[in-house]
Amino acid sequence: MPADRPDPRKRARAAAKPCPICGKPATPQSHPFCSERCRDIDLNRWLSGTYVVPGRPLDEGDGD
């Protein structure tokens, strides 16, 4: 398969899951989102601290 053509199996998987932001069908161009707008909303949530990856609390002496 040529490198410039997307794999049809990936396209089918992208359409099978809904957008995590609005629930509309995902598109191959913005996978796993339905649009660039939803992709930007998700990025903003990560950058603003709305989404947080849990971890252990830092002690004051951990950085030394």
Image (tube, rainbow, N blue to C red):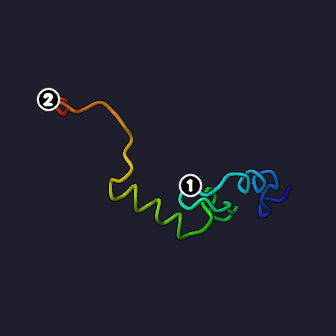
Residue 23 in picture, x, y percent from top left: 60, 59
Toward the front, the furthest residue is 23
**Amino acid bearing label 2:** Gly
Query: Which residue appears at 45% of the width and 60% of the height?
Result: 43
Q: Which mark is residue 20?
A: 1
Q: Give percent across and percent down for residue 27.
A: 68, 63
In the image, what residue occupies the spot 62% across and 56% down?
32
Does 7 sit above or below residue 40?
A: above
Q: Amino acid at mark 1?
A: Pro
Q: Nearer the viewer, mark 2 or mark 1?
A: 1
* Quarter of the picture holding the N terminus: bottom right
User: Dot 2 lies on which element?
Assistant: loop
Q: Foreground residue, 57 or 50?
A: 50
User: In the image, residue 19 lies at what x, y percent?
Assistant: 60, 58
The residue singled out by tag 2 in the image is 61
Given residues 59 and 20, the one toward you in this image is 20
Q: Earlier in the sequence, mark 2 or mark 1?
A: 1
Q: Which mark is residue 33?
A: none
Which residue occupies 14% across, 29% down? 61
Relative side of 31 to 10, left or right: left
At mark 1, the secondary structure is loop
Quarter containing the C terminus:
top left
Q: Is residue 63 left or right of residue 35?
A: left
Question: Is 40 drawn above or below residue 1 in the view shown?
Answer: below
